[in-house]
Amino acid sequence: MTEFAFIEELSDDAHEEKNQRKQEFPLMPEGEAFDMGTDESGKPLIDPRIFDAPEFFRNPYPYYRILRDHYPVFHDKLHNTFWVTRYEDITECYFDDEGFNTIPKGSSSGVLGNTQLELSGVEHRRRRNLYGQHLVGKALNNRIPAIEHLADEIIDGWTNLKEKDSPFVKDENGRRTIELGQVFANEFPIRVVCEVLGFPKESQSQFYYWYNSMMSGLGGSDTHKMGVEARQDLEDYVSEIVEKRREKPTYLYDNDGNPISKDIISKLCETKVDGDFLSSEEITSNIALVVGGGGETTRGAIMNMWALLLRHPDQFSEVLKHEENWDKAFHETLRHSSSIGGQPRHNSFDIEMHGVKIPAGSLMQMVDFSANHDDRIFKDPEKFNIFREDLYSGKLLRSGYAKEGKCSHMAFGVGPHLCPGAWISHQEAVVGSKIMSKRMKNPKIREDLMPKDIDGKKPAPMGIISVRDLWLEFDL
Amino acid sequence: MKVKEAKDPTKIVGKNGVVLRKSNYDSEGSGYRTYEVYQRERVGESTEKIKPSQLISDSFRFDPYPSLEILRENYPCYRDWLSNCYWITRYNDVTSIFSDDANFETRSKNHFLRAEGLGKDMGSELPVLFAQEKSFDEDTSRITSKLIEELLTNRTVDLATDFAAVLPLKILAEQYGVSDEESSQFGHRYWRMQRGTSWDPRLQMDGKNAAQELLDFFAGKIRSGEHKDMENCLSAMVALGAKGKDVVATLLNTDHETMHGALSNLWFNMLTSPDKFEKARSSKRMLKLAYLETLRHSPPVLSAERFALREIERFGRLIPEGARLICSAGAANRDPRIFDNPEEFTVDRRDMCQREPRGQYRADGLASGIAFALGRPSIHPAVPEDRPRSMYAIIRDASVSASQILIESTRGIQLEKDETVYLSCLTVGEMHTCWKLPVSLQAG
């Protein structure tokens, strides 16, 4: 992996910086906030440097609670941002896409290119539907056999493995130990994306590299260059494919080899906007967006779901008994520990929220993490309970966020910018997990291999980033 | 549909070695490219040479110049994702923003203290300006002499805290009719209020409390009619109908940082290089030039913030409405495009203008050092005769005469041995100056 050599170098530097910040904000036990002082009325203060601190990344929820309870809109002057943290406020902003716009001010545009993330109203809807329509409803149902087939193929790789040829699969005392990320979750969502996009199989390894580079380039940081370069490579590659598919579209096939439908790239090739065919640059942007949205997020959902379920064995056994509970487990996982922290918005007009004046054009961070843990909506939010009564876990709502007196979680957002990949991501995680649960007998987490919290006993909190490595063992 | 072949397979490489395009492929019909994507190609910016966290790090607090140089030479309009702002670092770019108040707004310090209801800044009313000019011209030498007399009772004096920090506050106290007994408390409150414009919530809280205390203090003064016997800024303001909150708002926006920081940095620069000190003290004119060079070489206020009033294209970027621009004087003043050998502190610099610049930061065809706050150069091409001199000139004269008095009334000023002195900011974004400058001196 020579390509990644210089990332190692940089991370040394970053490590030093992290150590420096550690001293400013000591690591606290999970669920407890570091005391940053109070004002005269006893209201806790928030030092905005906490948002860069490692403590915050592993243990963000107590700080979000302070924000929700005392600063529903927090003006962070160091990062020049307004943090919005209550469920009700965030949903209101998400539905008002005129007052809270998404015009490009972020770093993603350099890497992802020109996508509908940054548009509003009709323009946004039109572009979103270009590929969004291929990821829902009947189109999605048509693709499920392909997803199942892929999951089967990958899982076969390590369940039927006779000889040890991977550092992530070990056999001991009749039990097999695996690292779920390496053997399944890292690869599976990207394979699915490649499949539904219609990406040629031979270039999939190159595709991982592009994917990783583009993801790390999104932050507009020192790795931005890699992202921009990877995007350019992808664009060059895609333009070749597009040239071919404009003349000869390719298809997805079911298990019997009958064509189900055209793949997304072929569909995009024949799509017109305002009477014009999409350029290869636009098609690349759409591909980049589907890949960016469909990789890491679904990976995180699968990893977190398994980690949480296995740490709550009673709930896991319920899921095994009744397959329909997988849906509940999926939604509760996304509420409890989602992979997406929030979305930026910019207010179009001068406004005042909770007594805070926000000048037009300000960056407002809608913190979905915090909304998901808002005890005004979800009772006892830090508890993982797939049977909770206040979380809506039925068929995904395309408009609105509440049904039958229950509220949706915010992991997919709500309103016009609701994640178009929500449905397919749901299917991936549930289909993949169902198959895995049948192949793995008596699975357990190898807690001895998992990172520990600062007390050295409890498992480390999930925090903002999803579980990185998940070591499982099961009967051979 | 027929598609064109790739036209030109040669690579187009951007500024930082980033491959922008490998081919000029475009499809027939749709040549659609949004501005953002076009901009990515044209600017070719990637930012691997600096991490945005460096710009709020501890090392930046002490020595910002290496990081600023990276920005200036590589990313003249740097999008800082972490602090959500744009850094403008070249001299001509920075001054172009300052002179463009149609597109970039300045926000008053009330905004930063989050005290919009505080009152009106009356600092630009003519009677107040005249009173200020008069006070700086007439009171400075008296106050300085008295201060030096007090200092000379000790053998060792800290010029940073006992002289540079105290003098502007004493002059300010004089202008606002604060008696000698009240002045130390006044100075303390004033200083806390100024620090309250920071991003740090503890300082903000403290600053708001201090503003309230000052408000009570001045409201009491006005109520008791004390100002009636005076002829100073306070009385001028009250005559214009100011209330206590307006006085505090004016005080908040009249900051002392340029005078305090420039005096401190001037003495820091002179004392750390004795030959330069020898040259600077040789005449009052040389001292003035040393002062101007200090504002260029080590400006106490490192940057000023401007906010884009509308979406606007500048420096090859699309700057969105409401964007915060950090216009860095620290970087611009060391721009080698403008000043030769810019890292060097040169007392009589030939490529810098030696009087108050009017219009686009230049006079006599030469650029001036950029300084803010009280030392803001007038951007108007001419000033009518019935107006006071610009604050830039007034503060310069006051600082130079104060330093001149210090030189004349003492002898043998030199740094205490074995002392390491350095410039630093107390927290990120605050004044960059010397906080400890112990010297030994004798009455001369």
Image (spheres, rainbow, N blue to C red):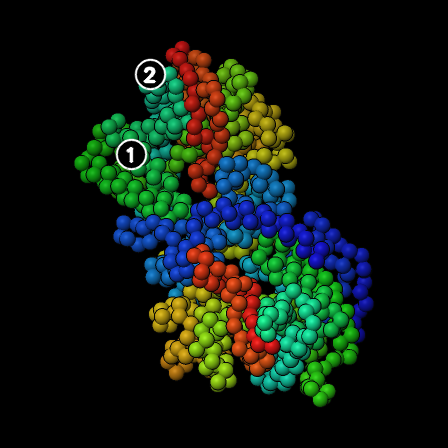
Residue B298 circle label:
none
Of tags 1 and 2, the one toward the viewer is 2
Residue at screen point 29% across, 30% down: B184
* Label 1 environment density (alpha carbons within 10 Å; few <14, some 14–19, many ≥20): many
Q: In the displayed structure, would residue A222 be above or below residue A281?
A: above
x%, y% of residue B214? 27, 39
- Left or right of residue A294: residue A276: right
Mark 1 falls within which chain? B
The amino acid at mark 2 is Thr
Q: Residue furthest front?
A: A173
* Local SS, label 1: helix
Q: In the displayed structure, would residue B158 be above or below residue A264?
A: above
x%, y% of residue B198? 41, 44
Residue B186 circle label:
1
Name the residue beneath numbered marker 2: B153
The amino acid at mark 1 is Phe
Residue in front for this viewpoint, A357 or B161 = B161
Q: In the displayed structure, would residue B226 be above or below residue B289?
A: below
Q: Quadrant of the C terminus of chain A?
A: bottom right
